[in-house]
Image (spheres, rainbow, N blue to C red):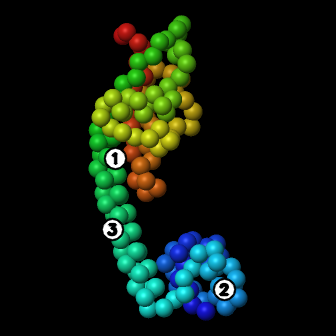
Amino acid sequence: MLVILKENVENLGRIGDVVKVTDGYARNFLIPKKLVVPANENNIAAIDHQKKMLEKKRAAEKLSAEELSKKIAGFTCNISRKVGDKDKLFGSVTTTDIADALAAGGLTIEKRSIHMKDPIKALGVHTVEIKLLPEVTANLKVWVVKEGA
């Protein structure tokens, strides 16, 4: 039986693929779980239309993410912290601090999009990666300075 996948199915294919499966597998498992629809002219046309709409949406998202990436690359993030002896920070600079500093600068980024191996625990310039989409990333320069300096 020819079916069109509505969801990604492991070892079978991705959304929109037309695959041939056994009748029993389709009737007893795939169709009741709404993972597939039978491949007929109407369903193929509907899936093609959905694919085109999804591609347009993804292209628009990618374009806006690339524009935001350029803004982030040109943005300098200054974060001031209290320091102790030998310029050691009290606490650290985390993704939340960076997201708040970006929001204060007019850029709204979710903190889970900001990737750091460890929190920043030293003064100076640090480069932080921001992953806007799986294929679009931006590098942000974060300046950690003494409070009141």
On the image, numbered disc 2 is attached to which residue?
A: 27
Whole-number angstrom distance, CA of label 2 to CA of label 3: 33 Å
Residue located at (61% from left, 92% from top): 1
On the image, numbered disc 3 is attached to which residue?
A: 56
Residue located at (51% from left, 21% from top): 122
Relative to 110, residue 64 above or below: below
Residue located at (41% from left, 18% from top): 80
In the picture, measured across the screen, residue 34 lies left or right of residue 100, that is right
Whole-number angstrom distance, CA of label 1 to CA of label 2: 47 Å
Query: Is 46 or 105 nearer to us in this picture?
Result: 46
Q: Quadrant of residue 10?
A: bottom right
On the image, numbered disc 1 is attached to which residue?
A: 69
Query: Is 83 or 49 nearer to us in this picture?
Result: 49
> Which label sits in the foreground, 1 or 2?
2
Residue located at (64% from left, 88% from top): 21
Amino acid type of the residue that numbered disc 1 sits on in the rendered structure: Ser
- Contact between marks 1 and 3 (CB within 8 A): the answer is no
Would residue 129 be seen by someone viewing this image from the given angle?
no
Q: Secondary structure at mark 1?
A: helix
> Which label sits in the foreground, 1 or 3?
3
